[in-house]
Amino acid sequence: MAAEADREAGADPNVPLWGLKAFVTVTGAAVMAIEFSSQRLLAPFFGNSQLVWGVVIGLILLALSVGYHWGGRLADRMPRAQVLGGLVLGTGVFTAALPVLAEPLLLLTVRGVLDTPAGVVLGSLIGVAILFLPPVLTLGMVSPWAIRLAMQRRSVGDSGQTAGSLYAWATVGSLLGTFVPVFWTIPSFGVRATLWGAGAALILAGWGMTRRWASGLLLGAPLLFAHFAGPLLKPMPGLVTEVETPYQFAEVYQWGNGVALSVNDGAGIQSVYTPSRLTGLYYDAFVTLPYAFSLQRPLSALVLGMGAGTIPTMFRKDVDPWRHTPIRVTGVEIDPVLTALGQRYFDLKPGTAQVVHQDARVYLETHRQTFPLIVVDAYSNEIYIPFTLTTRQFFTLAAQHLSPDGMLALNVNALSESSPLLQDLERTLLSVFPDVAVARAPGAFNYLLVAARHPLKPPDPAKMPAFLKATGLELATTWHRPHPGPGLVFTDDRAPVDTLTDQMILSRLWPALSQSSSS
């Protein structure tokens, strides 16, 4: 009776189960490829924060839920493989065109999150994310539709096994769609090529399901998009180069009379080089710290989060000429591409630092050397400090690598001294170190935190060369022991660094958004 009803409804009972398994594998892979590509497509313009991920993942889950619902309903009304294949084929063309369709909205935010009107930022982010809803919604229809087609050839008693098998193969596809883009196509060929590959795979799958040779002409659509559309660059004044690495999206651009590096740029500068002395940014505060030690003493420093080498290079230029011996710098940087950019554009000369390409915390776990000076300057995304480098466990580990008279220093982005992020970090440091100091650092929202096992004093400006005295004096006049009061101490179990940073960003965006909505 069921088979007779299917024939009356126009069903196609000739789709083999192995073909449906292959079909759901391809579409499952495409969903994940689109999700990861969308995040990387947005990162240069909106950053890679929890805010962006929340919008992307939330909308994709919404699209999948609607797709599951409508896929089941449409499958009962039109249980035909050609209809499903046609939808997936069209989705493939749309997927290949996504970078071109998204570009006009992305161009509205060329200045980044913190210096673009809030309405433009939020509107563009939501608008671009919505572009990813149609393909994901359609691909969400596939699994229930495939189960409906499969059951036309099988008995009701096999329905659980059939559904489980198809969902298992769809999950295998999701795994492929996760690992292949993340570890191969995005770092090797870029986001545009990854979306083109996902689109081409969907077109092939849809073409195979429709079994119409005429529809094969659509295979040329992604090739046309790829041919006529150049690489999706973030247009910004003075762009020198940009590159996608396995870890992030990196841009080098002209900055004053030098160059700057930004990664996943919604806000923030990760490295800077100026031919002249100092930078005018928080890096200058780090340059004063070696003057807290005797200029005759051999000195070594560990820089966790070296980036393109700003701090080692400034030590070489602005500290070593006034010391009896050069500072021996060990620079730990997880992304070797940033080191290569430093060597090419940021005057990171051979011998400036012993470079170790490793996660900062893993380095501390696997090495035993001690240092008089440890600088923590790691930012995983724009102004976000990796939470693993903010916890009591991390600072306890770092303390084991400090010389008895050594000091640990880190830069913190904060709107004011009462910022919850800054106070939580002060409290966490005080749970490990007997003495902690905080001071204003050059830059709009920068504070220097210094911790040690001995009483701390600011570096003496009298020991510094003339060009550094003003920075040293500002540091000394704002240097004081913090009193954050009771509250949260960051641990590996709970360290809401991203959330607190998001709150700062939103507090900057919200007044602008309120003003634009009221005008």
Image (tube, helix red, strand yellow):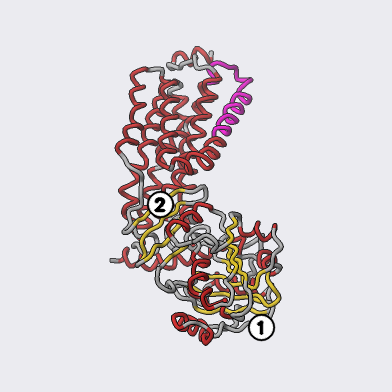
Mark 1, secondary structure of its residue: loop
Q: Amino acid at mark 1?
A: Pro
Q: Amino acid at mark 2?
A: Glu
Let me know if residue 117 is in the magenta part: no
Let me know if residue 161 is in the magenta part: yes
Q: Give 177 or 396, whichever is nearer the viewer.
A: 396
Classify residue 454 as left or right of residue 310.
Answer: right
Residue under pointer 2:
242
Residue 147, image x, y percentages: 54, 25
Residue at horizontal 56%, vertical 63%? 353
| Location of residue 18 by image quarter | top right
Residue 218 appears in view: yes
Residue 446, image x, y percentages: 48, 73
Report the disc number at residue 455: 1
Q: Give the Cα separation between the discs numbered 1 and 2.
A: 44 Å
Q: Which segment did they paint magenta?
A: 150-173
* Helix, strand or loop: magenta stretch: helix
| Location of residue 118 by image quarter | bottom left
Residue at horizontal 57%, vertical 76%? 290
Q: Residues within 10 Å of mark 1 (few under 14, many from 20)?
A: few
Residue 106, image x, y percentages: 34, 51
Which of disc 2 and disc 1 is earlier in sequence?
A: 2
| Location of residue 199 by image quarter | top left
Residue at horizontal 43%, vertical 42%? 190
Residue 483 appears in view: no
Mark 2, secondary structure of its residue: strand
